[in-house]
Image (cartoon, rainbow, N blue to C red):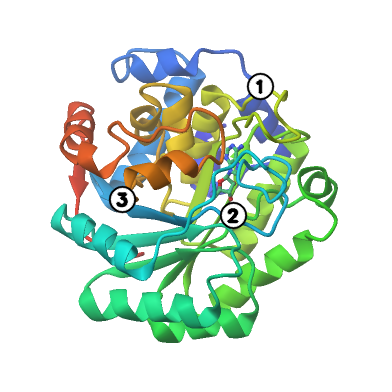
Amino acid sequence: MIDEIREKRNITQEQLETLLTIEDDSVLALQLAENDSQSALHYLYQQAREVADAVYGKRVFKRGLIEFTNYCKNDCYYCGIRRSNKCAKRYRLDKETILDCCAKGHELGFRTFVLQGGEDGHFTDERICEIVASIREQYPDCAITLSIGEKSKESYQKYFDAGANRYLLRHETANDTHYRKLHPEELTLTNRKQCLWDLKEIGYQVGCGFMVGSPGQTIETIYEDLEFIKELKPHMVGIGPFIPQNETPFAKEHAGTLEQTLRLLAIIRLIHPHVLLPATTALGTIHENGRELGILAGANVVMPNLSPKDAREKYTLYDNKLHSGDEAAEGDANLRKRLEKIGYELVTDRGDFS
Ligand code: 5AD
């Protein structure tokens, strides 16, 4: 079955169900020496790795994440920086601070800067364009990625013209009923999907994605996510476990698991050999070796944090978010070592879609 998925670059809902429900300790499967296991999941990961290695070699790309505002006008039930969270300590970085983050990152070999923030009205199109244009001017060789939510096509076009090349906007779920469970009424799946199509049309490299194990997620909704990804053909797919945040309506919900996230990373790699797949901070948060395991399951991107320390502490999308270890920019040398241990090289190039 795994060979078939790899060959056809396609999965049926039945196959997805089998792979997501098969009882098998995949972490153990991953840690076993290659070819030393009869485990189906071991085979799944090995095949996913083979596919990733054939396209990208033993290389992992790094992107520098700059979380520049945690103000948000939206009220998504899962997210710790939702507007109703009165406990969140709000902050914004000014242009100079953002440029300092880029300078620090550039010195550490980062050639992609990801500006991420809540949907913050303070950052008008004009301000965003000014920031993007300054980064573009100082770092003509770098990719600029925006991750600032749903905007009009005109706004997206302005950012693009100012020098942004990539945009991350997780679709969160491709199933309408599930979308309604995760978001208040003013947000719609139709608009979110439209944003992704607009971004593509303008010429951005786009990333969509979803949380694994979010409340209300089922095999069926995941299957719809995979169908949507096939339709959209994004350059990147960001998936990581849902982790409850204490001050949100989902505080008491269960977190997504390492197991399910790894299985889905591998499945997405088999179906989309070229896609950029980050081993996310959330994955590193639920397991100490989460990111390495993600790489071994087919991921090929890491996104260390370039934000100032106090900002990181306040960008609390979920509880216990890592913010001072190897996931941070200062941990660059450590991260490199950890990846070398599993046979991967952390590279500095932009890793443009090939
Ligand atoms: N757990 C995991 N991921 C989350 N995100 C937001 N809240 C959480 C949470 N509680 C993810 C969303 C969003 C991205 C920036 O962070 O998928 O798109």
Give the class, few, some or many, for how many residues have Cα within 10 Å of label 1's Cα (few <14, many ≥20): few
Quarter-wise, where is residue 141 in the image? bottom left
* Residue 169 percent across, percent down from the top left: 57, 60
The residue tagged 2 is 170
- Could you say whether the residue bearing mark 2 is in a helix, strand or loop? loop
Nearest the eye: 140 or 314: 314
- Name the kind of residue labelled 3 in the image: Leu
Quarter-wise, where is residue 165 in the image? bottom left
User: Mark 2: is the Cβ under 8 angstroms from ligand 1?
Assistant: yes
- Name the kind of residue labelled 1 in the image: Thr
Quarter-wise, where is residue 79 in the image? top right
Give the class, few, some or many, for how many residues have Cα within 10 Å of label 2's Cα (few <14, many ≥20): many
Above or below: residue 261 compared with residue 103: above
Above or below: residue 91 compared with residue 314: below
**Image point (47%, 15%), residue name:** 39
* Residue 278 percent across, percent down from the top left: 41, 45
User: Mark 3: is the Cβ under 8 angstroms from ligand 1?
Assistant: no
The residue tagged 3 is 306
Above or below: residue 133 compared with residue 262: below
Split into quadrants, the picture shows ligand 1 in the one at top right
Label 1 to label 2, Cα distance in Å? 25 Å
Of circles 2 and 3, which is in front?
3
- Could you say whether the residue bearing mark 1 is in a helix, strand or loop? helix
- Could you say whether the residue bearing mark 3 is in a helix, strand or loop? loop
- Name the kind of residue labelled 2 in the image: Arg
Tag 2 near tag 3, CB within 8 Å: no
Of the image marks 1 and 3, the number of the one nearer the N terminus: 1
Label 1 to label 3, Cα distance in Å? 37 Å
Residue 21: image tag: 1
